[in-house]
Image (cartoon, grey):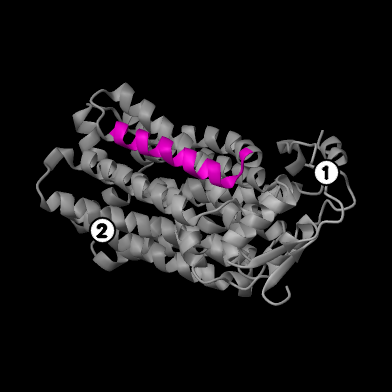
Amino acid sequence: MNDDRLLIRSKDDIIHFVNHAPNRKGGLLIIFVALGGIFIDAYDFTSISIGNAQIQKVFDLSAFGMASVTAIMALGALLGAVFGGYIAERFGRNKVFLIDLLLLIVATFGASLSTLFPILLVFRFLMGVGVGIDMPVALSFIAEFSNLKSKGKYTNFWQALWYVATVSTGLVDLVFYELGVGVSLWRYAVGFGGVIAIIVLILRFIYVNESPMWAANNLSIQEAARIVEKTYHIQTVVDVIKEEKPKVWKPKYSTILSKQYRARTLIGTVISATQAMQYYAIGFYIPTISALIFGKAMINSISGTILFNLFGILGGFVGAYLTSRYGMRKLAIWGFVLVIASLLFAGLKTNNSVLWLSALPIAVFIFGHSAGPGAQGKTIAANSYPTDLRPLGTGAAEAASRVGNIIGIFFFPIILSALGLSATLLILIVCPVIGLVTSLLIRWDPTGKDLEQELSGTTFADSHSVSL
């Protein structure tokens, strides 16, 4: 940089600038706008869990049918995550941002207006596809927008925003409840998610440009320079002696399973899967758990949901701000330990009459999960690969998370009905134990690492052949 101008002679100059640029004014706004799809995902998850009993009554559903309402969205998200990485790498982050939000808007309003159960399932499946595409793209964009020092912290903000959304859902539901909408509460709550999606779409259109790193790898240097100017509000001077040839390879999932990337892919996907199993087994039933602790009225389910998820907001921000100091892997380890301790306490506790003893393990569980593995699996994935592979690595972690999502939602109530709450919580400890052992054995941590030059000296064609 000279006289507030950036001299660009190759794509490496753009990548180096992004990795070392100071945090720009308004950068946090762009990050939270990029995470808007995650907010919608968490909002919908909580609105459905709060309206669980109402939906079951309206559509006359069995336990299996009710589980399908949430699991079908997870299945759609699984497919969206698997194919979203290819789409994001082919067409860019920003275009996918706008397209998947349009899908979310249509699907959200469609779900809230559904009068037949199969139609509800179709729209919730489409919502899942939109969310599954959006999550890897959002985390990839943030990793490609932030400098090396802030990548982990800013990517980890997604977990705090998740819990901001869950608390916001409780507050929205509380308003609709006080307005006396009755058994239609879930329709109003889910439909309001479509309004949020419209707001996020408008904000993304205004504030979010294309990822500078993706542009450097996929567009001409002149086009990439214009994106850098719009994003960072600086002047660029392009002085390319020899225009670089466009890449001739297409990334494949086999690349992230090759020897070079296998360990980091394994730790990201295992943490993502195990944290999802533990969270969705407990998190989806927080309104029900709140009713058991505080009383069976709907107001207690909503209030308890708000209260417990406040610990998630706290944990999310604590984890984000500790990332640069301790690293993502250590945070995952500490979080798993807290989750194991909370499940062990809740499972072995025999005194169910003391209110705070019943509420404490749930609060600790949510805090430990949010500060630790809840965020770190996907954050590790988003920061463990160079730009061309990042959407695939993050998509794999998202897909693993959705598998854990489906398992947690389906099997938790089955085990619960067969063995009771205490035994179920003790069995659930298997999930964080697997995640903890994996995190201890695989010592990969991408915090502060510059990975963009990992394939330097290797042509794209060569990289493609290595992945076969």
Q: Position of residue 244 (x, y in %)?
A: 83, 48
The answer to whether 135 is drawn above or below residue 105 in the figure is: below
Q: Position of residue 390 (x, y in %)?
A: 67, 48
- Please check the rendered image and state whether residue 110 is part of the magenta-colored stretch, yes or no: yes
Identify the residue at image location x=69%, y=62%. Answer: 445
321 left or right, relative to 239: left
Q: Amino acid at mark 2?
A: Gly
Q: Amino acid at mark 1?
A: Lys
For residue 304, which numbered disc appears in the image? Answer: 2
Nearer the observer: mark 1 or 2; the answer is 1
- Please check the rendered image and state whether residue 154 is part of the magenta-colored stretch, yes or no: no
- Viewer-side residue, 130 vs 70: 130
Disc 2, SS: helix
Q: Quadrant of residue 356?
A: bottom left
Q: Position of residue 426 (x, y in %)?
A: 45, 51
Residue 351 seen by the camera: no
Q: Quadrant of the N terminus?
A: bottom right
For residue 245, which numbered disc appears in the image? Answer: 1
Which callout, 1 or 2, points at the residue further toward the start of the chain? 1
The answer to whether 64 is drawn above or below residue 262 in the figure is: above
232 left or right, relative to 254: left
Disc 1: CA contacts within 10 A as few (<14), some (14-19) or many (>=20): few
Q: Quadrant of residue 417?
A: top left
